Image: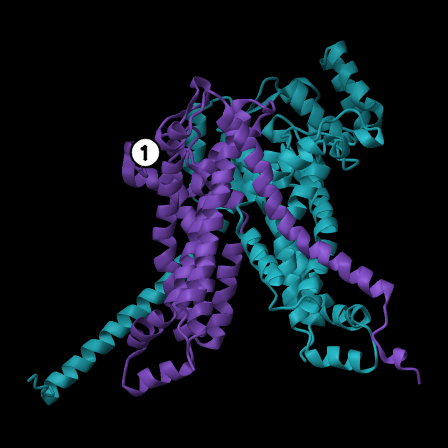
Chain colours: A cyan, B purple
């Protein structure tokens, strides 16, 4: 027989102390996982900030001093125009004039043209922010040795001009304007598609269908599964259906638009709408579930029909929750990249999107493209693009939180 | 009063609305069906091509569309490697975070720590890709020296782990907090330490939920595209060595369809075959996770 003997007093204390030491060590281990999460998030953020600002070593093909006695920044529109006319070939000038009459362009625009076309700035090296701040002397020495003709300048790649100018093949002049507008169009179309369908499906599942019926269970399981389908699969669906099968509709050929194929904003927006639909339904269901049954019973009690009850009582009460949910779905859509690649985002779009039937680019697509380039200056504008995207996400989430705090009712 | 007036009236609007809502609800099923049909249709075209055989597709380890070699293992190996790395990173971290948040943290600390995980969950994947390529890879190059290239599966896997960490942690936390308090109280009454309660009582009790969280996390990693497209390399490569560059299934689809791919070519239809496989892998993983929750849930009371 196994005889259990209690440990002696000292041994018992040692035993307990050991157990507590072990508990303490594990608590530290649990906590450190959260510390790793915090470190990752900070590293992510600092890495982006690090990339978006810093010293740049660049060279001019032509010395700015030969153009005019005054620095370029102080010249007015007429002087800049004269410089452009004098230094560009007739053909090149006419081409630019055809695109947009030179006399109607702003001074800033002309100045950029002068730098881009005449001075032909060439970035030699970019330095990240923290090195720029703490190792300035080393950078200066390196530049002086490696690129004797280069100028060194501290630059923020995220500027108002970056947000307001369209794409360019040179990182120094590239902007995110067309990409931002493209993203907004796509998210707008996606919400227009997914919000009514999502709310309708949620209302059907919560208010109409018999919760225990097989059909309801099938739909519910299906929605949960759809939420887990990889976004790239939705992209393939969009490619086959919206881009190819519905080409007459998505290219606008039905409506008399002739210059595009199916790879348009509309196709991208519809794909994104299908992608966020499951999320939209699940969020709307949660919001509708939070409305207490007493509201429904009271509505029935005064003789309203089911639709009257839903339309006049449940939906208004659930509205803040539904809106919060759809903003969260929007923030998912604005960051999605893979489906847009599949649906066929063009990477080089310089004209603002004017209708759903234009070819498009989007902010995450540009970030992907810029990150994939080898040159440092493209990584720098990718970082600037990420900051713009984060700004948009922050705005969306702040709106969602405000909405929730302001209008959420406790029953 | 005539007895008919008490009967349920036939209201046209009511029935029309109900029918419309039903159609909208059924639309979601239609989406799933059309995914299967559309992907299946193109995949069928791919498999009907005389240059493709099923045995080669599922057996061979070379994927070179230009040379008519279609062995999916060249892509699956990279998907498996990166997902395994991500799981290795995310499961211990996510689970520890969940235990800390649900059992140790004061409400105040929870309020401060949770948003950090939620922010991590909200970071767009393309940003994680940037992070992998321009932050993690240089660090790894410092550690491993020349044996690791600019593109490698290790950095993509690690960052993918960070990406799915919040998912695993929040699902596990839900599972842990669903364990009834009586279990905790009983264990504490026996003199157990917090660690003993968490690891020996709560963890086994919440195992089904945690298992589901891990499976969903794996499904997420398998379907993740941008991180691997940016950081793990362009070009199918049959290898399980995390230091090598290799292209995953998703990365391959993204790279090939990035250009203007002519419709109907083998290149084009092969992507649908890969996507269909991806769809079924994630579908099965998601269904298994739901089944695990339903089947192995500990029933209390």
Image position of B26 with respect to A366: above or below? below
- Measured as percent of width and height from the top left, residue B251 is found at 47, 35
Q: Quadrant of residue B81?
A: top left
* Residue B188 horizontal side relative to residue A269, left or right: left
Q: Which element is circle 1 on?
A: loop
What residue occupies the far top of the structure in this picture?
Answer: A90
**Across the whole image, how many numbered discs are drawn on residues?**
1
* Residue A324 horizontal side relative to residue B139, left or right: right
Q: Is residue B150 visible?
A: no
Depth order, front residue of A38/A104: A38
- Measured as percent of width and height from the top left, residue A227 is found at 56, 53
Disc 1 target residue: B239
Image position of A34 with respect to B261: above or below? below
Please give the name of the residue rendered at 80% of the width and 19% of the height, measured from the top-left corner.
A97
Depth order, front residue of A66/B168: B168
Depth order, front residue of A359/A401: A359
* Image mark 1: chain: B
Q: Is residue B112 visible?
A: yes
Q: Quadrant of the C terminus of chain B?
A: bottom left
Depth order, front residue of A86/B146: B146
Callout 1 environment at 10 Å: few (<14), some (14 to 19), or many (20+)?
A: many
Q: Quadrant of residue A306?
A: bottom right
Image position of A73 with respect to B195: above or below? above
Please give the name of the residue rendered at 56% of the width and 31% of the height, measured from the top-left corner.
B42
- Measured as percent of width and height from the top left, residue A71 is found at 68, 28
Please give the name of the residue rendered at 37% of the width and 30% of the height, measured from the top-left corner.
B237
């Amino acid at each position: 027989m196994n005889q259990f003997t209690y440990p002696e007093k000292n041994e018992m204390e040692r035993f307990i102390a050991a157990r507590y030491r072990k508990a303490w060590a594990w608590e530290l281990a649990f906590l450190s996982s959260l510390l790793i999460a915090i470190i990752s998030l900070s590293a992510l953020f600092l890495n982006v900030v690090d990339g978006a600002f810093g010293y740049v070593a660049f060279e001019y093909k032509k010395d700015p001093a030969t153009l005019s006695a005054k620095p370029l920044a102080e010249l007015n529109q007429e002087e800049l125009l004269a410089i452009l006319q004098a230094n560009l070939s007739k053909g090149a000038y006419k081409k630019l004039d055809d695109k947009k009459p030179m006399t109607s362009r702003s001074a800033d625009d002309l100045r950029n043209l002068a730098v881009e076309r005449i001075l032909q700035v060439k970035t030699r090296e970019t330095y990240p922010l923290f090195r720029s701040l703490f190792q300035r002397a080393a950078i200066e020495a390196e530049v002086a040795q490696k690129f004797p003709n280069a100028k060194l300048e501290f630059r923020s790649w995220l500027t108002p001009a970056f947000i307001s100018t369209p794409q360019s093949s040179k990182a120094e002049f590239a902007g995110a304007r067309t990409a931002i507008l493209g993203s907004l169009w796509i998210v707008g179309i996606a919400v227009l598609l997914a919000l009514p369908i999502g709310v309708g499906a949620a209302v059907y599942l919560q208010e109409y269908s018999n919760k225990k019926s097989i059909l309801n269970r099938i739909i519910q399981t299906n929605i949960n599964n759809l939420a887990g389908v990889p976004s790239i699969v939705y992209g393939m669906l969009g490619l086959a259906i919206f881009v190819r099968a519905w080409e007459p509709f998505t290219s606008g050929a039905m409506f008399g638009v002739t210059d595009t194929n199916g790879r348009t904003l509309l196709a991208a927006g519809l794909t994104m709408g299908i992608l966020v639909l499951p999320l939209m339904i699940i969020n709307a269901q949660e919001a509708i579930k939070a409305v207490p049954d007493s509201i429904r019973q009271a509505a029935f009690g005064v003789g309203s029909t089911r639709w009257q009850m839903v339309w006049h009582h449940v939906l208004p009460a659930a509205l803040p929750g539904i809106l919060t949910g759809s903003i969260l779905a929007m923030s998912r859509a604005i960051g999605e990249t893979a489906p847009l690649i599949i649906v066929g985002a063009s990477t080089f779009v310089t004209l603002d999107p004017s209708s759903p039937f234009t070819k498009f680019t989007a902010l995450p697509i540009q970030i992907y493209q810029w990150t994939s380039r080898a040159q440092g200056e493209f990584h720098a504008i990718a970082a600037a693009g990420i900051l713009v995207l984060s700004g948009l996400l922050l705005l969306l989430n702040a709106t969602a939180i405000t909405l929730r705090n302001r209008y959420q009712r406790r029953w | 009063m005539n007895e008919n007036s008490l009967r349920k009236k036939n209201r046209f609007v009511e029935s029309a609305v109900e029918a419309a809502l039903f159609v909208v609800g059924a639309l979601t099923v239609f989406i799933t069906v059309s995914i299967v049909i559309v992907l299946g249709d193109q995949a069928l075209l791919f498999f009907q091509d005389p240059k493709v055989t099923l045995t080669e597709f599922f057996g061979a380890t070379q994927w070179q569309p230009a040379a008519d070699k279609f062995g999916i293992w060249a892509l699956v190996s990279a998907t498996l490697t990166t997902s395994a790395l991500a799981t290795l990173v995310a499961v211990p971290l996510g689970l520890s975070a969940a235990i800390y948040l649900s059992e140790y943290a004061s409400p105040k600390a929870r309020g401060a720590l949770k948003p950090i995980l939620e922010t991590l969950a909200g970071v767009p994947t393309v940003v994680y890709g940037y992070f992998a390529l321009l932050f993690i890879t240089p660090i790894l190059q410092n550690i491993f020296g020349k044996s690791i290239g600019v593109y490698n599966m290790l950095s993509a896997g690690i960052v993918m782990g960070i990406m799915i960490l919040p998912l695993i942690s929040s699902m596990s936390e839900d599972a842990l907090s669903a364990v009834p308090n009586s279990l905790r109280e009983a264990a504490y009454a026996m003199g157990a330490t917090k660690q003993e309660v968490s690891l020996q009582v709560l963890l086994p009790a919440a195992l089904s939920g945690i298992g589901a969280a891990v499976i969903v996390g794996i499904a997420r990693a398998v379907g993740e595209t941008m991180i691997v497209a940016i950081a793990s390399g362009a070009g199918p490569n049959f290898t399980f060595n995390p230091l090598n560059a290799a292209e995953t299934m998703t990365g391959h689809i993204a790279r090939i369809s990035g250009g203007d791919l002519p419709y109907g070519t083998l290149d084009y239809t092969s992507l649908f075959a890969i996507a269909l496989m991806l769809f079924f892998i994630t579908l099965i993983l998601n269904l298994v996770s739901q089944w695990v929750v339903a089947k192995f849930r500990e029933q209390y009371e």
